[in-house]
Amino acid sequence: MAIDNESAKSSIFEGLNMIPQMKCKMTPQEYLEFERSADTKHEYFDGEIFAMTGARPNHNRISFNIAGELKGQLKGSNCMGFTNDQRVKIEAITKYVYPDLSIACDNVEFDDDSPESLLNPVVIFEILSDSTEAYDRGMKFEHYQLIDSLQEYILIAQDRCRVDKYVRNRKDGTWILSTYSDKKQIVKIDAIKCDLPLSEIYDRIELKSC
C-alpha cells in the first residue's frame, strides 16, 4: 500500500495527544535505542517519534476489564495477551505502535532487531477517545491492515456503549464490520475463541447511555 508520507504526517497526528518530540529525523535503530532509555513510551513513523500521553480513568478501567475477562478464557490455549506496554512493529512501513491490548497465537514472533517488538498480533484492541478516534478508525487502521497475521480489529468507545469489530475476510482481503451497542450483547472474537460481553467491558463504567 503506497503512503504519501508528507501528507500522512500532517494529518495522522493532528488533534491527537501525541506530539513530535524531535525536529531531526531518526532512523529506526536510533528510535529503538532512544526508546529503551526513555521515561515515557513513544510511537515511531517516518523518522519521527510521538510521545504517548496518559489515559483517562475510563480508558484504564475498560482496558483492565477486557484483560481480566480474556485472561481466564485464554488460559491453556495457544494464545497470549499483551497490555499497552507491548510495542508492535508494522514491518511493511517500519512503524512502531503501542495498541491498548493485543493478542498473538501459536508461534509468537518478535523482531530480531528489537526483541521487545511484537510482529504477529492476531487481535488488536484500541480504546477510543475524542482526540484519537479519527486516527484509530482511519490511518492507524490502514496501517494495521498491513500486518498479515491480524484477523480482528476491535474499537471500543469509552464515553458511550459501543464496540466496533472489524474481521478480515481472508478470501478477498476486505474487512467486515459488526457494531454492538447494548450491554446484553456479546462480542464473539472467533480468532481467539473468546466471548467478550459488553456488560464486562463496561462494568463499573459511567456512560451517557448503554
Image: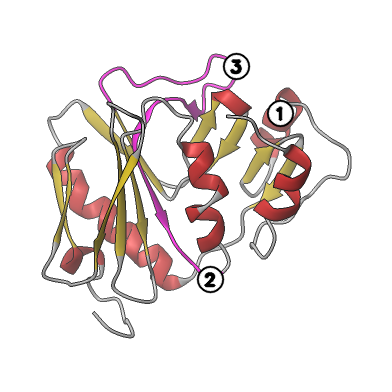
Q: Is residue 82 visible?
A: no
Q: Is residue 48 visible?
A: yes
| Colour scheme in use | secondary structure
Q: Which residue position holds label 1?
A: 33
Write down the quadrant of residue 193 in the picture.
top left
Which numbered tag is attached to residue 130?
Answer: 2
Q: Main secondary structure of the magenta part?
A: loop
In the image, what residue occupies the spot 56% across and 55% down?
A: 135
Q: Residues within 10 Å of mark 1 (few under 14, many from 20)?
A: few
Q: Is residue 55 left or right of residue 53?
A: left
| Residue that lies at the very extreme toward the bottom in this rendered image | 208
User: Residue 119 appears at what percent x and percent y?
Assistant: 45, 25
Q: Tell how many labels.
A: 3
Q: Residues within 10 Å of mark 2 (few under 14, many from 20)?
A: few
Q: Amino acid at mark 1?
A: Glu
Q: Amino acid at mark 2?
A: Asp
